[in-house]
Amino acid sequence: MHSFPMNTLYKRFWNKFSFFKMTVTFLLKSSMTLSFCFFFRSGFGKKYLR
C-alpha cells in the first residue's frame, strides 16, 4: 500500500488548503467592504451626498 499515506497526506493538505482559501476569501471580502465604506464616507460621501 504505497498510495495510502500519499492519499491521506493529500486529503489533509486539501482540507488545510480549503480552510485557508475560505479564510482568505473572507478576509478579502471584509477588507473590501471596510475600504468601500471608508471611501464612501470620506471622499465620495462628502462630494456627492451633501
Image (spheres, helix red, strand yellow):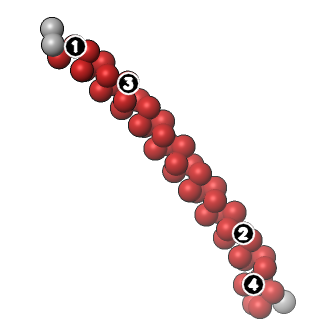
Type of amino acid at the residue the image marks with label 3: Arg
| Callout in the foreground (3, 2) | 3
Q: Residue at x 78, y 76 (%)?
A: 41
Horizontal side, residue 26 vs residue 40: left or right: left
Task: Name which of mark 4 and mark 1 comes first in the sequence.
Answer: 1
Q: Nearer the viewer, residue 42 or 50?
A: 42
Find out whether the residues at labels 4 and 2 contact each other: C-beta distance under 8 Å.
no
- Quick check: 12 left or right of 29? left
Sequence order check: which comes first, mark 1 or mark 2? 1
The residue at which mark 1 appears reads as 4
Along the line of sight, the residue nearer the viewer: 22 or 45: 22
Which mark is drawn over residue 12?
Answer: 3
Q: Are marks 3 and 2 in contact (CB under 8 Å)?
A: no
The residue type indicated by label 2 comes to Cys
Which amino acid, by three-letter code, is at mark 4?
A: Gly
- Pointer 3: residues within 10 angstroms few (<14), some, or many (20+)? few
According to the picture, the residue beneath numbered tag 2 turns out to be 37
| Residue labelled with disc 4 | 43
Left or right side of 44 for 1: left
Whole-angstrom CA distance, mark 3 to mark 4, is: 46 Å
